[in-house]
Image (cartoon, helix red, strand yellow):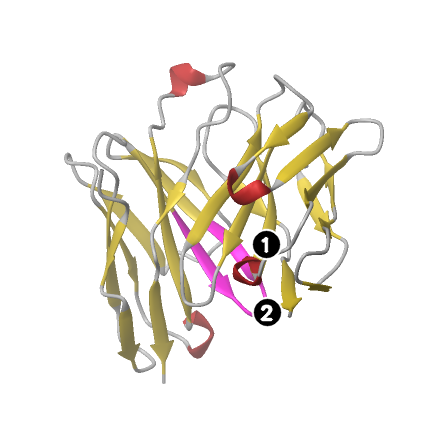
Amino acid sequence: AQSVTQLDSHVSVSEGTPVLLRCNYSSSYSPSLFWYVQHPNKGLQLLLKYTSAATLVKGINGFEAEFKKSETSFHLTKPSAHMSDAAEYFCVVRTPGGYNKLIFGAGTRLAVHP
Amino acid sequence: KAGVTQTPRYLIKTRGQQVTLSCSPISGHRSVSWYQQTPGQGLQFLFEYFSETQRNKGNFPGRFSGRQFSNSRSEMNVSTLELGDSALYLCASSLGDPLRRGIGPDTQYFGPGTRLTVL
């Protein structure tokens, strides 16, 4: 069965410092992995997706994630946090079979302090 | 290109009533998926429709149902509402072409959601 575990429910950083949001996955197959962001009272926005073409995936707004099969991890990083990055972030795995059932992690709430 | 739209944005109902939520996908997208988001359970998959057919279903009771029309618009219905049905209901659309298998994951684009409150 597919699953994702987000290791931190809350992360707090200062503006201008690096961001690290951790995600481990469990999958019997080569997984399809995503990171989505949700700002307050908004829908979900795709940050990036792992397509197996490259282990280092670049997304929008300066975010990137590295797929590490040996560690079953897909951590999200950003070199320098901005106040507008404050939101909830979800690590997501897609079930195999060509269909669109997504399994979400519990989410990590990122706070950015001035 | 217009994004995914959901109507209404907010709903207040009482226990025992039923409710219908609507989702219009991005033009050209044929797959519509529905998710329920609650503080306790997080985001959970409800069902997915593609070309008017339900092709995947989550672990929800039969009170939750949906359908998709020929123009790809989708509705979901919840009958006999319970307090625990209070949630943000999110709809996502994607191209959904099953022949894309092996090309890469089909990106899902989410709407702003419908906030349902059951009193």
Front-most of A46 and B93?
A46
Q: Secondary structure at mark 1?
A: strand
- Please, is residue A90 above or below residue A71 in the view? below
Q: Residues within 10 Å of mark 2 (few under 14, many from 20)?
A: few
Q: Main secondary structure of the magenta part?
A: strand
Q: Which residues are magenta?
A: B34-45
Residue for point 40% across, 75% down:
B82
Tag 2 residue: B40
Which residue is at 51% across, 20% downward? Answer: B104
**Residue tagged 1:** A89
Image-based side of A5 in relation to A58, left or right? right
Residue A10 shows in this picture:
no
Q: Are marks 2 and 1 on the same chain?
A: no
For residue B96, say whether it is visible. Answer: yes
Query: Which class describes the residues within 10 Å of circle 1: few (<14), some (14-19), or many (20+)?
Result: many
Q: Is residue B67 magenta?
A: no
Residue B104 in the figure: left or right of residue B32: right
Image spot of residue B33 (x, y percent): 38, 43
Percent from the top left, x then y, of residue B10? 28, 72
Mark 2 element type: loop
Q: Chain of mark 1?
A: A
Viewer-proximal residue among A114 and A12: A114
